[in-house]
């Protein structure tokens, strides 16, 4: 399947679109007329796409982006508090929280290609990705305090663990908009680039990630996420380490290093 241009304009608004090219999968939010504001059906579609990605062992990296001039305006405010899908999802929190947590837990590395502004809940959607590369015209804000909304706990946890307590307080409690330079300064952006080189920078990082050892990366990502959440299973992390010392990946990695060639994982 050929990959659509992730920053291009779709013929019509739709649920998120998946394109796969080689080891890279690109998910594109696709409601540009409404700044890619997420609807309930988009959440269902994203969960399906995440399952497809996890089931395809050939996929080594995922890029999440938006169509048009914004990454996403967040979740449709009219749907907040309206949607639950059974007792299991109710106990896990909102439907949106479930989707963002699922993105954070994807085994393959994820890159958010921030093609423009990111607002509301979509700031957390981007934050759930492992890397965020944004254009220098991007901006973000979290309006929960203006809306009278106490944000869901895992979203606050992501803000605190990735950006620090003081930055999380500033963004949540003031509800002030910040620009790309400030997003970079506080660590929200991994990199800030001009619009003209956004794809080049995303492609470079995607190639790097796709070329590394997938089992080792999956395990280390899992361990890092557990440490960030304060839920580290030390025995499981030790087991993954020991298994890697006996695995095929390390044999290939050492051989490639000795032979001065790129490894073939």
Image: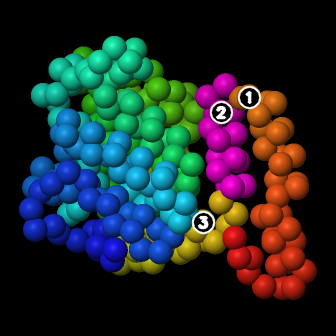
Q: CA distance from mark 2 to mark 1?
A: 7 Å
1 and 3 marks in contact (CB < 8 Å):
no
Q: Which mark is residue 144?
A: none
- Is residue 180 visible to us here? no
Q: Dot 3, crowdedness within 10 Å: few (<14), some or many (≥20)?
A: many
Quick one: 65 or 168, which is closer to the camera?
65
**Residue segment shown in magenta:** 215-231
* Looking at the image, residue 29 lies above or below residue 157: below
Residue drawn at point x = 28 percent, y = 68 percent: 7
- Is residue 34 visible to us here? yes
Residue drawn at point x = 53 percent, y = 41 percent: 105
Number of labels in the image equals 3
Q: CA distance from mark 1 to mark 3?
A: 25 Å
- First in sequence, mark 1 or 3: give its number: 3
Give coordinates of residue 167: x percent, y percent.
Answer: 50, 34
Q: CA distance from mark 3 to mark 2?
A: 21 Å
Q: Which residue is mark 2?
A: 226
Q: Dot 2, crowdedness within 10 Å: few (<14), some or many (≥20)?
A: some
* Looking at the image, residue 87 lies above or below residue 165: above
Give coordinates of residue 222: x percent, y percent.
Answer: 65, 41
Tell me the element at label 1: loop
Residue drawn at point x = 42 percent, y = 64 percent: 25
- First in sequence, mark 3 or 2: give its number: 3
Tell me the element at label 3: helix
Q: Which residue is mark 3?
A: 209
């Amino acid at each position: 399947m050929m990959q659509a241009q992730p920053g291009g304009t779709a013929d019509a608004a739709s649920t998120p679109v998946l394109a796969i090219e080689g080891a890279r999968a690109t998910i594109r939010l696709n409601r540009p007329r409404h700044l890619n504001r997420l609807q309930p059906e988009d959440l269902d579609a994203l969960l399906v796409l995440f399952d497809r990605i996890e089931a395809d062992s050939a996929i080594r990296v995922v890029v999440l982006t938006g169509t048009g001039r914004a990454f996403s305006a967040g979740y449709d405010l009219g749907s907040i508090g309206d949607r639950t899908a059974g007792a299991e999802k109710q106990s896990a929190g909102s439907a949106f929280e479930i989707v963002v947590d699922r993105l954070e837990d994807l085994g393959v590395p994820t890159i958010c290609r921030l093609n423009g502004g990111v607002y509301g809940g979509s700031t957390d959607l981007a934050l759930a990705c492992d890397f965020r590369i944004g254009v220098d015209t991007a901006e973000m804000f979290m309006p929960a305090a203006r809306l009278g909304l106490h944000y869901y706990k895992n979203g606050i946890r992501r803000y605190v663990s990735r950006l620090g307590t003081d930055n999380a307080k500033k963004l949540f409690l003031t509800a002030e908009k910040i620009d790309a330079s400030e997003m970079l300064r506080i660590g929200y952006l991994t990199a800030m680039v001009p619009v003209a080189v956004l794809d080049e920078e995303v492609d470079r990082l995607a190639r790097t990630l796709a070329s590394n050892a997938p089992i080792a990366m999956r395990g280390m990502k899992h361990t890092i996420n557990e440490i960030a959440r304060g839920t580290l299973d030390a025995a499981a992390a030790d087991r993954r380490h020991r298994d890697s010392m006996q695995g095929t990946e390390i044999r290939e990695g050492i051989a490639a290093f000795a032979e001065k060639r790129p490894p073939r994982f």
